[in-house]
Amino acid sequence: MPKKTLYLLLILLFSITFAQAQGDDPARLRIMQLSYLPEISAVIDIVLDDVLIFEDIVWPFATDYVEVAAGEHTLTTAIVDQPDANASTLLTLEAGQSYSVIVNGQYSQQVTFVIVEETELLAEADGSIAIIVNLTEQVISNVTIDDAPVLSEIPAGDYGFLALPPAEATIGGIVGELAYSEVFTPLANTDFLIVVLSMPSGEPQIIYHRSSRLTITEYLQSIHEGAQFARVAELLAQTDILDSLADDGAYSLFLPVNGVIDDLIAANLIPDAAQLGGLFATHITTQNLPPYALPQNETLAMLAGNTVSLNFGVTDSGYWEIEGAPILWDVRLANGVIYGIDGVINSTQ
């Protein structure tokens, strides 16, 4: 049996067994991989109560959510092919709640687990929200959005929540005496998991992950004007593509960002409504391929029947590429993932 098939069957068996045993609503759990072993690997396998739930998770990606029964569980992470390089922690998960666990540090020294309980986020979120996790050894002070103070401090090893504006925003703070800032692309109905680390130089390093509880169709139908993907969402609304994406299906969409669509409109290169559906079908594959799984594919078969090539090596753009178009970033959704790309996929059968 192929390793990936066995892995998926184990997850299914794990979820069913614990749900039946507990009889409660499951908790939701995801893991962000920031741990490593110097000069060997930064790729880990993740085990929950002796069951492999994720494998080959590369630094600095986060997994999708997995449903887990409420109660106590042992979470173990280990460098791939280095079983002695491992670390564990005990999780206490409540029914119906969501959690993020950030795994950070060197296995040759110390690996820490920061557990983010997201109940407050899910209960109060209206629009886009950020969780800022402080993995430096100092307090983050003077947290701002566009220079306006929003949090006085986030202690080391702790986290805080921010509501984000529906426009491009700069989130900043001070670690010790060093100020940092990061510009965030406006995305509708999105949760940002933002981690602040200290590099060996002492300079702050920002790593972030985007996700939403909505399905792909719900997400693209709910985007407000000015948010990223707003332009492509307007075009998709002229087709029946979104209605064809089943909520219980699995998909990866590679969608042009706003600037690409604006350039196409300016050059009068947008096809008419009758052809738009065919165009966007060349940008969709019926697989859920988050970034830690995407590099396992050299090519993808797309909804329109075309095959596209992927390049994960050295590229002129400096990004991973699909049919030569840079893959800029991703948003994880309930039934798949959307990648923002700086270009349009040309169909090849």
Image (cartoon, rainbow, N blue to C red):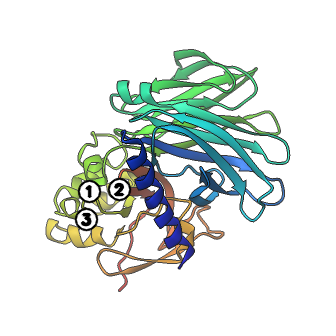
Residue at the image point whose x is 32% and y is 40% from the top: 226
Quadrant of the drawing holding the C terminus: bottom left
- Position of 10 relative to 259 (above/below): below
Give the spatial CA distance, label 2 vs label 3: 28 Å
Front position among marks 2 and 3: 2
Give the spatial CA distance, label 2 vs label 1: 6 Å
Outermost residue to the bottom: 349
What residue is disc 3 on? 270
What residue is disc 2 on? 335
Q: Secondary structure at mark 1?
A: loop
- Mark 2, Cα crowd under 10 Å, few <14 / some 14-19 / many 20+, is many
Image coords of residue 343 (percent x, y):
42, 64
- Position of 43 relative to 308 (above/below): above
What residue is disc 1 on? 247
Instruction: Assess whether mark 1 and mark 2 are in contact (beta carbons under 8 angstroms).
Output: yes
Instruction: Assess whether mark 3 and mark 2 are in contact (beta carbons under 8 angstroms).
Output: no
Residue 140: name its quadrant: top right
Q: Secondary structure at mark 3?
A: loop
Residue at the image point whose x is 46% and y is 63% from the top: 289
The numbered disc on residue 281 is: none
Q: Who is closer to the viewer here, 222 or 9?
A: 9
Residue at the image point whose x is 31% and y is 45% from the top: 214
Give the spatial CA distance, label 3 vs label 1: 28 Å
Disc on the earlier residue, 3 or 1: 1
Q: Who is closer to the viewer here, 325 or 2?
A: 2
